[in-house]
Image (cartoon, grey):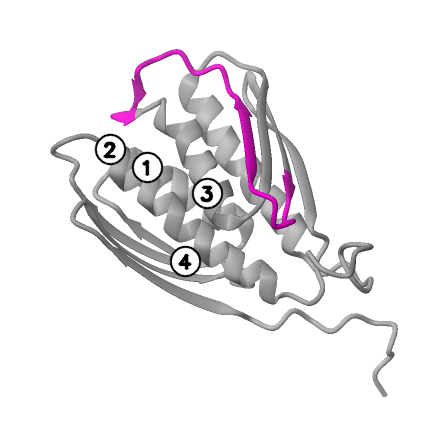
């Protein structure tokens, strides 16, 4: 006999998204209840690496392919990828009947320490304080890192705070921010075992 006090296991919820514009063509398959099967191909090596870190450490299955006008710059590719991923995440979290809703992580990477706090609430907001001063890392424009997070938060209807506590190496700061977000998502999307994620009765 099943104990009614025991929360039911999360049902795998796979989302597929396709966004095509004159600037980019992006296809995504996402299952946040996955087994870390990740394949990313955007044509931008460092961006691929960061997206892989995000999906792998969050425990997702993710297939993402993207083509963009990289002959111009990386703006459209990074922004549109964030919009597609955010839309898939919003569809996922709104379909979940049981989740913690909140997630947070303080993540170290050598000399770097990054804080992430996340609320899957339906109120889009993003604040990043990563202190990135270099023009680029691995050919990724550093100004696109906070823009990625902002676009993700707007499309995902979530509140996101990211802050560098300490650190100088820009690769470490960016990678630690993606990993911190991954573990915050892992916590926020995990079953809480309690009815309702808000006293309002709806998010």
Circle 3 is placed at which residue position? 152
Circle 1 is placed at which residue position? 47
Q: What span is colored magenta in the figure? A: 118-140
Residue at the spot x=40%, y=31% of the render? 147
Secondary-structure class at tag 3: helix
User: Quadrant of residue 9 in the image?
Assistant: bottom right
Which sits in the foreground, 70 or 154?
A: 154
Circle 4 is placed at which residue position? 62
Looking at the rendered image, the disc whose residue lies closer to the viewer, 1 or 2, is 2
- The 10 Å Cα crowd at callout 4, few under 14, some 14 to 19, many 20 or more, is many
**Of the residues under marks 1 and 3, which one precedes in the sequence?**
1
Quarter of the figure that contains the C terminus: bottom right
Circle 2 is placed at which residue position? 74
> Does the CB distance between marks 3 and 4 fall below 8 Å?
no
Determine whether, in the image, residue 50 is placed left or right of residue 19: right
Residue at the spot x=46%, y=35% of the render? 150
Residue 138 visible in the snapshot? no
**Of the residues under marks 2 and 3, which one precedes in the sequence?**
2
Disc 1 from disc 2: Cα separation: 10 Å
Residue at the spot x=63%, y=49% of the render? 120
Q: Position of residue 98 (x, y in %)?
A: 72, 64
Disc 1 from disc 4: Cα separation: 15 Å
């Amino acid at each position: 006999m099943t104990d009614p006090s025991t929360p039911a296991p999360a049902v795998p919820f796979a989302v597929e998204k396709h966004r095509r514009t004159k600037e980019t063509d992006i296809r995504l398959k996402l299952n946040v209840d996955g087994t870390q099967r990740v394949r990313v191909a955007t044509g931008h090596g460092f961006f691929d690496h960061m997206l892989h870190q995000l999906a792998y450490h969050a425990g997702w299955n993710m297939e993402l392919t993207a083509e963009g006008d990289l002959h111009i710059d990386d703006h459209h590719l990074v922004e549109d990828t964030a919009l597609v991923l955010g839309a898939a995440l919003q569809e996922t979290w709104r379909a979940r009947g049981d989740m913690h809703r909140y997630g947070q992580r303080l993540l170290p990477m050598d000399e770097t320490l990054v804080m992430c706090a996340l609320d899957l609430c339906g109120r889009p907001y993003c604040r990043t304080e990563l202190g990135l001063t270099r023009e680029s890392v691995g050919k990724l424009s550093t100004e696109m890192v906070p823009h990625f997070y902002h676009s993700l938060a707007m499309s995902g209807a979530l509140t996101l705070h990211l802050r560098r506590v300490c650190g100088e190496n820009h690769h470490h700061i960016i990678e630690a921010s993606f990993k911190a977000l991954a573990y915050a998502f892992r916590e926020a999307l995990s079953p809480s075992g309690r009815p309702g994620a808000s006293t309002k009765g709806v998010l």
